Amino acid sequence: MLAGNSYMLLGSQLRFPFSCLKPESHRKKELYRAREPPLTFQLFTRRRRFLNFDRKIIGNGVRFEGPVMDVKELEKIEDDDLVVETCIVRTLPPALTLEDGLQSINEAVEQLKLNPPSSSGMLRFQVAVPPSAKALNCFCSQPVSSAIFPLFFLSKERNNPTYKSLFLNRTGGVFGIGAAVYFTDSSSCFPRSESLIKRYLSSDSIFASIYGFVDINFDTKSSPVKHDAGSFYFFIPVIELDEHEDVSILTATLAWSDSCLCSFEDAILSYELAFCQVRSHFLPTTERFHSKHVRSAIRKLNMVEDKTVEMVSVKALSLGGSNFGADPTGIPFFLREAPSFCQFSFRFSPTVGVASNMLDHASELTSSLQDHVNINSLWASLVVEECSRLGLTYFCIAPGSRSSPLAVAASHHPLTTCISCFDERSLAFHAVGYAKGSHKPAVIITSSGTAVSNLLPAVVEASQDFVPLLLLTADRPPELQDAGANQSINQVNHFGFFVRYFFSLPPPTDHIPARMILTTLDSAVHWAMSSPTGQITELIEIIQAVNKGLLLIGAINMEDDIWAALLLARHLQWPVVADILSGVRLRNIFYTCPEIVENILFVDYLDHALLSDSVRRSLQFDVIIQIGSPITSKRISQFLEECFPCKYILVENHPCRHDPLHLVTHRIQSSIMEFVSHLLKVHVPHRINKWCGYLQGLNKMVAQEISFQICTEHSLTEPHVMHVISKALLPESALFVGNSMVIRDADMYGCNWANNQDLTDTVLNSELCFNWIRVAGNRGASGIDGLLSTAIGFAVGCNKRVFCLIGDVSFLHDTNGLAILNQRMLRKPITILVINNHGGAIFSLLPIADRTEPGVLNQYFYTSHNISISKLCLAHGVKHLQVQTKSELSDALFTSQHEGTDCVIEIESSISANATFHRYLRKFSCQAADHALGILSRIPASNWCFPCKIHGMEYSLYRLQLRTPPTSSSVDHGHSRFYREGFILSLTLEDGSVGYGEVAPLENRQENSQDVEEQIRFLFHATKGAKISYSLPLLKGSLSSWIWSHLGILACSLFPSVRCGLEMAILNAFAVSQDSNLLNILHHQTENEGEIHKRSSSVRVCALLDCSGTPTEVAHVASTLVEEGYTAIKLKVARRADPVEDAAVIQEVRKKVGHQIELRVDANRNWTYEKAILFGSLVENADLQYIEEPVQDEDDILRFCEESGLPVALDESIEHCQENPLNTLFKYSHPRIVALVIKPTVIGGFERAALIARWAQMHGKMAVISSAFESGLSLSSYILFSYHLELQNAEICKVMDRKAAPSIAHGLGTYSWLEEDVTTSPLGICQNPSTGYVEASVAKANRLLQKFQINQSIVHRTFKGQEVLKYQLKVDSNDFSCIINALETGQRTDDSIVFLHGFLGSGEDWIPIMNAISGSARCVSIDLPGHGGTKVQNHCREGAGLDPTLSMEVVADLLFKFVQHITPGKVTLVGYSMGARIALYMALKFSDKIQGAILVSGSPGLEDIVARKIRRATDDSRARSLVAHGLQFFIETWYAGGLWKSLRSHPNFNQIVAKRLVHGDLHSLAKVLSDLSIGRQQPLWEDLKQSKTPLMLIVGERDAKFKAIAQRMCREVENGQINREDPSYKHCELVEVPHCGHAVHLENPLSVIRSVRQFMTRYVNVL
């Protein structure tokens, strides 16, 4: 007998049951013929007329050749007969729904119709829409009598897709309708007038995807389709929906050409037909289940199923080449190898269609009554059939006799996917996971008795988390109830109120109509999926009146809801706290600088910031909006309770109360999409308050501290797992998080990461700047049972590669889930990370751990175990990897990602170590929050609304006399005086505050005064007007980020001494602005620290001693230093040939000064390993504090530590650390490395020095700040910085329960070398009367900085700015007059540098570089013809014949005459891109006037004739588009190209693009684009071989194309100069600039500045 109950939660409403359908069998290899008359409807046109259409539009677009250009055919074509069309792209703002996206595009098209473009063109509108799968629905919703063709759906599933996958889970793909452009081979028949012109699509059309078939011939005129080897049919749809993992892209393409008999009006007509049809036949966003629509649509179409046919999709970006080979049939290899897809449905016309893997078994969906052995079997078959028609096709079957009719029916149904497991509990949780992933219920089939009871845990979880399930549970017949029958229990309402709907079916009988089963099932689904909607209009006034709003994003399951939540966050611009299950907690940021994401303020680390009582007291919100389920963080929940009373708005799509703290004041029962839709229509005032700055600063400070602590800890910790797992997640991945400790760690320590995304995603998401990772978990009842099974089900449902994070106890609780894991059915591989700390670690973090005996904890709370997870995996045949270190984890993640198998990664951990590390993280995070708040709270509230700006900067060159030569330089016995040179920076803020910094380069450290001064001059102009963040004093990445985001340069591109001086000036300016001092800026002092400050306000100083002389002489000097009050002495060694002599000196000094004095020695990497070992053996009893840099080879340091057993300090080894040096420092955690000697001017400033010092202190090592013979300005700053580090070290020791470390003698003894100083105030380093020791006074250092005045006697010159002259010169050449707009700066000399910009640029592009170089050279930049302020006039009269061209020869002649006007001497040319081509041409043709050329991303031209022909046609098309569509749309398309990928990630990209809009004469600009096309320029490759002019080729490391060109250019020049008399003379030099792409001079200008100066010095001798 069959009885069952059904239970569902959440979803859409199904209004009627399906009737039985009986499809006709489709005919193999026959064309589908329409039985319905053609569709007739009226289209309302612009002219207010109604047009009747009774015909179909089939591929009525612009015909293109190709899609790949045929070289042989192009050779025969005249230029006038070749058109290479460029598609102009307009990207519209993201839309909340697909309907909104359609409307947005239509409004843009309506605007276009008001100003119709020229006779030929291609325009594409695109908008980002929610990512959920809708393409298949769109296709199936179109009428059989469609008005426009082609019409298709293409599934992107490439892993053996079947028809079942359409119903099982998310099927992403592409929907397209109409053909804006179609491509056919030349053999197709067309009217002669149409075939004369060969039209191709430019590779610039990067957003356009081309779809179609190879070996298929389709005639759009007569509509036949033939299998024809060597033929092809490709097209670009009129309307297209392309679904990606995290976004869908809706596009509309218009193409027109009068020559192709497709006018603009025809293109508009095709679009309007497509738009009206799609809009009129469209499933609403709220419709969840689509299988009934899919099945009915497939049946109606009766399409031919042909699995031998594959559909091809090609990006237009790949079509621009002309050298593709072809197979014997004539099809280019490129098309043969293009991505092909084997699941699609394609309608060529009303009567012709083909499908693949869409129609299998469509004729077998029904069966006759005779097919069933009994009525039980019949009813079971009806139940399964109705489930499938309701979209429920995933069946989870537990073995059992009474449920066998259901199991057999489900397994035989052609559309169902079945999985089984012997454990009903695991099976039910698996169904929960599937429902979470797919957003539709799985069907569970079980036998009777306790088999049903085993479902209860999963039922509870699903009920609490509002996840839909359908349970079909078998039962014994009524006569066996309450009769002691086997496996018979009372199953009526067995799950109580945890289910929404229960029905006990009667025993099957002929007296009960079968439709009762269907309607019962439909009712169950209706109850489960329906949800009423609440009103939100009353909230508008509350939200508009908000002062301090907070948006909480809880757990969200639907992709479209995540999309809506992000649009809401951008609209409100409130601080956002996102739960780990929200999907937006782990974000993949597109740009290299996260600070670019300014329109959403995510406060990801509020949980740990709230550990600070001060933070809790300082934050208060008056309106809180929560969307999604309750949040994970208990601390945040408690904080929200402290915000009460406030307006707390909770948005949920169910009627149940989720308000454990009883805070909710307004409960809105609504879908997130609907709620957001209302709010997006409401204006919300954006208030910038001080508390927003607090939150941003706090979040960043705590985030940096957490990241630092996790990275600093060398062992593999559980927070480290959560910190790095996000980097392993790709957009096509998803994360399932277990409960207990795992989800809390993920919520607290999960992090975001920057990554270079696909270009399409980057551009379309420019207003969101990131994508998200879908995350799920079982937080309904938050139990630890069934988690593994749920994760596997989630992987099936979401159709993504899932990473599952789970604890060991949870894993062991559900090991039967491994049996389900083995059933790899229609899902991607899953990686399971098991945190194995051999027990329940969460209890170690709870209060019970502090008051309970260890034995009780282990047995009754931790439930400690020694179970082998590897053997469990082996027993189930699952791959297992065990990791114990960070590197092993990285390797395991890499392995799991690149193998197509399931994998369990077991991560060894320890409960006690985990508890200790968590305690450290909490304490240090609390300190970081207090520190940030202490600094930020001092800033006046008004300053947060109006960020401070830098008013300006000056600098002075000083020259100080030294008493003796520095120990770092070789002694020149010919000089009796020694000097130290450097620069004093004076940085002024808008409020008048002035801060001073010192730039003191060490000449032997790859820096020199000329290079350094050029960078300072660059900063002089770059910093003017720059906004400065008040979080800069927090250090920890703030300064590096500011240098990049506000100055547009990478911090690592600054010389270390320059960066140090800039940071010093900024920090000192902050101190003055806040009426404070540098110490208080760097370190917020608590009350206890204030007492320390009062008692001990000095820094110990280590003396520096050169060991030249006999041992006795050196010992005598050391003794004198001790008498002066020094307690520590560093001696320079390894200056002698024999280390034995150095050892003798050290022994003598130790004997002389005694053991109470700290002795350090510094070898400066001068010894070989053998000599260092020898020295170590001779001084092992000398009680050295450390030996600094004993060996030459950095790789020998650890070896020396092990062999000698002596303490070692690092100096040079840490000078060249990367921008984040923690990875480099990791290898130096050896206990014998006891100190790091940190020179801020060498290491690169205070921020990097602070990071390295903190790493040292965390590892119990000394952080010794050392000067490099700077002036009193730097020394005073270092004194305060050293004292800050002393206080910081005391904090670290306290947190880590260490013994307080003794004070450190810092390496500031170089002050004694100064004969004079840059300041008029005395330096505060002297003998302390109270201690008798030489110390640096903190108070005196503060006073010196606060009242700093420059000693003018040591200043050689001061730079306060230099004017940029603007003028115009008129020059004539042949048929043109040109008034050239010029900019000039620098010294007027006979030798000048002339800068030439690229296309769309102007002379102003070079101003930053010119300002830097102008200290030593005359710099002139011009606006090239057609650009900026340069005007071009054509002398030819109208009607005089052909319009003269602005060819390369003409432009070069104009510029040559300009050069003759400005100087009688020679000039050096610096050109970029188009300007580089001009510069190269002039260097080769006018060598008597051009003494050198620097080519930035330049080319000598195209050698291939066909390539030049293609480029001419392409640039002509671009020129037409520029005039037709205007500069703004043209620029959007231009900079969307792959050449500019690196530039787009630059923080100044928007400002750069804005400057490109100043060109007023579009016709002249278009003429230059066409006339100066590289396709019209004769190649200069042969001329290069004869070049006598020095060349420098500068390219970006990311610009592969121009790197290859430059390398070949160098080879050509070298080959032509083989016989040169001086073989060492390099006639052509190649410079590869790091961290940039094509626009080198904009992306990394400092490298270009240095390269230009080196070129001038080497070849021109100007500088």
Image (spheres, grey):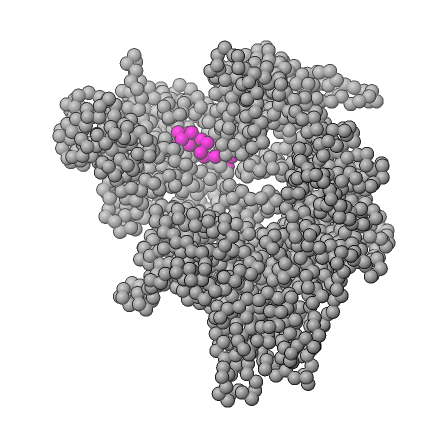
Foreground: 257 or 1096? 257
Magenta stretch: helix, strand or loop mostly: helix
Which of these two is toward me, 1227 or 1255?
Answer: 1227
Question: In the displayed structure, would residue 1585 be above or below residue 336?
Answer: above
In magenta stretch: residue 1060: yes
The residue under the point 66% across, 68% down is 389
Q: Which residues are magenta?
A: 1046-1061
Q: Is residue 383 above or below residue 1330?
A: below
Query: Which residue corresponds to the image point at 56% horizontal and 89% vertical from the top-left?
Result: 479
Spot occupied by residue 1446 in the image (x, y as percentages of width and height): 71, 22
- Identified at 39% across, 60% down, the residue is 871
Residue 947 in percent (x, y) is at 49, 41
| Picture layout, residue 1621 above or below residue 390 | above
Residue 447 visible in the snapshot: yes
Please state if 892 lies on the left or on the right of 909 as rendered: right
Q: Quadrant of the N terminus?
A: bottom right
Q: Is residue 1030 magenta?
A: no
Judge from the rendering whether residue 68 lies leftward or rightward of residue 1268; answer left or right.
right
In the displayed structure image, the side of residue 1329 where residue 776 appears, left or right: right
Return the x and y of residue 997 as percentages of the image width and height: 39, 30
State the image quarter where residue 10 is shown.
bottom right
Foreground residue among 1613 and 1188: 1613
Q: Is residue 177 above or below residue 506?
A: above
Task: Answer whether residue 810 is visible to the viewer in this image.
Answer: no
Residue at 85% in and 36% down: 193
Q: Quadrant of residue 1209?
A: top left
Q: Position of residue 879 (x, y in %)?
A: 45, 56
